[in-house]
Image (cartoon, coloured by chain):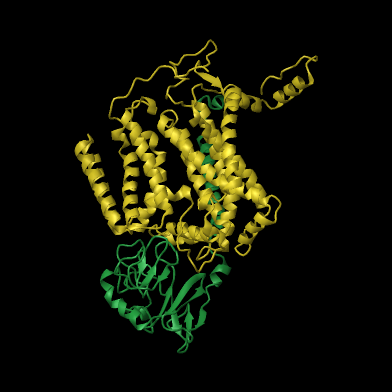
Chain colours: A green, B yellow
């Protein structure tokens, strides 16, 4: 190697310029080729198309009962809350991180920006995925002291992964790992007992 | 090209064959000399020095068993769980291959943790072995990625929700996070696309990187030579050497350490096979019970925890709550105040320190604790890379350090084990406090090392290694 360039004055600067230019062109080509490969990591057209709206009949849902349906691969809870459960919403408001659902990470639709976070006060529709790391919280509907929960527990949901707690409207309690309330998906009533999850009137 | 070596026509057939190859492929013969028969390793290795070769053995076990598992496994969300059960029940001896692979994953981390601890106590990361240590830390990081992606493949409840949680960690990164998580999953939730790409990474991409790093780790080691329990350089300019320039305190790796390591391999295989045959689930620590339930995207198991080898880092992730952020901000402010008042730095640099602390504190208040939890968990691994430059002790080996260093290292290990224990437990208020203290200790151990490692009176280091012939 060393004897090929024994004398620096023999170096041909125009050749070197072209070598550098060729190297840069090669690098650009390499990056351009990498783009399609990285793009294959994106959700496929099939995965995007799977986000169709889901129709649910809630006529048989009794007060205090919850059903889970799948929408875009996520669990969506539909729960008909009892009068007592609705009454707890006001009591816990002081302990909540965002009682009025003002935070923007998972924007709450306008029609659910109220204390019960729903169109009909008793029927809660929410995505059962913790806003922390995506676990599905479990039902802790019985009020009173119990493991992993405070002694003045009024009923709600507990995320088993990192202990975030949510009230009966999916609002997160203060000082918990979860940064936000449970997401309320776009939804609307097709009739009094038919719910459509995934679309709302403005769309 | 090297000179062609002629051999006597009366030589044996074996010698002729060797000569034929040596003339055409001298590189292999040189490599054998450099890395085996003429690689001089210190003669005073103790049992801690088994774990490097054991890590190589486990790597081979994982690759061989992995090849055979891929012949029967189906990377499809609808078929994966069933195909693992098929391997366990219907494939002849499939259960053995699968249990060797699952036990091998845990065994890998056992030997790697012990191997890293050896480096820690004997100062094997110190000059001139910084790169050996850095390649080793990179191997550890890549090994974690390999284990994590492999754990999704059985498609059980723990596989699914573990992946869901870890991939969502990336979405905590401000601005790019949600898109990055989407790019990793390839879908809006962990699904078939995720399983397929994790399979590809687990069986091809990551093992290739791992093998490359292992080669780099060994080449870098053989360039500078092995450290030893005394931390004495056997190949340095002042080290005693024989007439041929070979170190007097070194012995050729082959046959001395190859034979020596066979003892370690035998003991290791006794333990390994005992686990494979009698306790492959290891009480739910090597194979978690929830993973015998097929993945259900609609229902999270009541308690999810990562496999044991991730739990110290998982505990640190869970320790970072919004309350903890105030403690961390206090640490940043305290560090900046001490840095400015106690250290002799140019005033411009002091202003940079103050400015940096203010910006960092503001960011810590502005960005959610979830993101900082991810930063702390990642930082706990990344900080290991900087160890060579954090340690200011005049001697390498724990043998000649002040006695209280031994207790400090002891507490460090106990703290690490406590964090690991808390990581498998369900969240609890007491556990949260303990893990917060443990996290602060873990980082304090490393970040304050430049200061504490200089304190105390070191013992005199001998000029030769301590070795009693036997």
* B407, above or below A147, in the image: above
Q: Nearer the viewer, residue B247 or A26?
A: B247
Q: Quadrant of residue B156?
A: bottom right
Q: Give percent across and percent down for residue B14.
A: 76, 22
Q: Quadrant of residue B274?
A: top right
- Which quadrant of the figure contains the N terminus of chain B? top right
Picture residue at 37% right of the left edge, 20% below the top: B461
Q: Quadrant of residue A86?
A: bottom left
Query: Furthest-left residue in view?
Result: B341
Residue A148 in view, yes or no: yes
Q: Nearer the viewer, residue B40 or B135?
A: B40
Q: Give percent across and percent down for residue A120.
A: 38, 84
Query: Furthest-front residue in view?
Result: B278
> How many marks are shown on the rendered structure?
0
Q: Nearer the viewer, residue A136 or B283?
A: B283
Query: Furthest-top residue in view?
Result: B243
* B1, above or below A180, in the image: above
Picture residue at 77% right of the left edge, 14% below the top: B8
Q: Give percent across and percent down for residue A129.
A: 44, 68
Query: Along the horizontal axis of the image, is A99 left or right of B31?
Result: left
Q: Give percent across and percent down for residue A32.
A: 54, 53
Residue A203 in view, yes or no: no
């Amino acid at each position: 190697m060393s004897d090929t360039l024994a004398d620096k004055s023999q170096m041909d600067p125009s050749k070197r310029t072209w070598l550098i230019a060729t190297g840069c062109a090669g690098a650009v080509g390499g990056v351009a080729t990498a783009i399609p490969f990285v793009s294959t990591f994106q959700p496929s057209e099939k995965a995007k198309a799977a986000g169709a709206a889901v129709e649910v009949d809630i006529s048989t849902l009794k007060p205090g009962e919850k059903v889970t349906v799948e929408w875009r691969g996520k669990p969506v809870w539909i729960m008909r809350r009892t009068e007592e459960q609705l009454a707890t919403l006001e009591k816990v408001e002081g302990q909540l991180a965002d009682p009025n659902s003002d935070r923007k990470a998972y924007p709450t639709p306008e029609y659910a920006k109220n204390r019960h976070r729903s169109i009909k006060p008793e029927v809660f529709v929410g995505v059962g995925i913790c806003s922390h790391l995506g676990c599905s919280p479990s039902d802790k509907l019985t009020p009173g002291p119990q493991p992993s929960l405070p002694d003045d527990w009024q009923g709600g949901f507990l995320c088993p992964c990192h202990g975030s707690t949510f009230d009966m409207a999916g609002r997160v309690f203060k000082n918990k790992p979860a940064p936000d309330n449970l997401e309320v998906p776009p939804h609307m009533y097709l009739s009094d007992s038919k719910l459509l999850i995934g679309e709302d009137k403005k769309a | 090209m090297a000179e062609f070596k002629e051999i006597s026509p009366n030589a044996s057939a074996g010698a002729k064959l060797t000569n034929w190859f040596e003339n055409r492929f001298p590189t292999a013969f040189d490599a054998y000399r450099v890395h085996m028969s003429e690689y001089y390793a210190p003669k005073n290795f103790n049992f801690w020095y088994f774990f490097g070769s054991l890590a190589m053995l486990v790597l081979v076990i994982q690759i061989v068993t992995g090849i055979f598992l891929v012949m029967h496994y189906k990377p499809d969300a609808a078929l994966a769980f069933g195909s693992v059960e098929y391997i366990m029940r219907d494939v002849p001896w499939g259960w053995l291959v699968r249990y060797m692979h699952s036990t091998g994953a845990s065994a890998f981390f056992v030997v790697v943790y012990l191997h890293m601890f050896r480096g820690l106590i004997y100062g094997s990361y110190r000059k001139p072995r910084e790169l050996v240590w850095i390649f080793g830390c990179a191997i550890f990081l890549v090994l974690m990625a390999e284990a994590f992606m492999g754990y999704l493949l059985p498609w059980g409840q723990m596989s699914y929700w573990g992946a869901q949680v870890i991939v969502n960690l990336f979405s905590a990164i401000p601005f790019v996070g949600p898109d990055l998580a989407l790019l990793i999953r390839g879908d809006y939730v962990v699904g078939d696309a995720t399983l397929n790409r994790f399979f590809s990474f687990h069986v091809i991409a990551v093992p290739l990187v791992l093998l490359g790093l292992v080669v780099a780790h060994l080449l870098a080691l053989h360039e500078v030579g092995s450290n030893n329990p005394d931390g004495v350089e056997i190949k340095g300019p002042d080290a005693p050497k024989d007439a041929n320039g070979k170190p007097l305190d070194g012995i050729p790796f082959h046959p001395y350490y190859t034979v020596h390591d066979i003892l370690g391999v035998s003991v290791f295989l006794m333990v390994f096979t005992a686990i494979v045959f009698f306790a492959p689930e290891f009480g739910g620590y090597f194979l978690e019970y929830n993973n015998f339930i097929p993945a259900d995207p609609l229902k999270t198991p009541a308690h999810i925890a990562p496999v044991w080898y991730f739990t110290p880092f998982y505990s640190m992730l869970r320790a970072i709550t919004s309350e903890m952020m105030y403690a961390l901000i206090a640490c940043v402010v305290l560090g900046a105040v001490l840095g400015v008042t106690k250290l002799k730095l140019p005033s411009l640099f002091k202003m940079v320190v103050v400015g940096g602390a203010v910006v960092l504190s503001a960011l810590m208040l502005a960005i959610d604790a979830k993101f900082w939890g991810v930063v702390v968990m990642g930082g706990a691994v990344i900080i290991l890379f900087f160890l060579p430059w954090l340690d200011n002790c005049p001697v390498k080996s724990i043998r000649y350090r002040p006695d209280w260093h031994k207790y400090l290292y002891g507490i460090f290990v106990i703290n690490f084990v406590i964090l690991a224990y808390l990581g498998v437990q369900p969240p609890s208020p007491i556990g949260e406090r303990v893990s917060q203290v443990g996290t602060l200790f873990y980082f304090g151990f490393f970040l304050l090392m430049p200061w504490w490692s200089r304190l105390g009176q070191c013992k005199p280091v001998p000029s030769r290694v301590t070795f009693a012939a036997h």
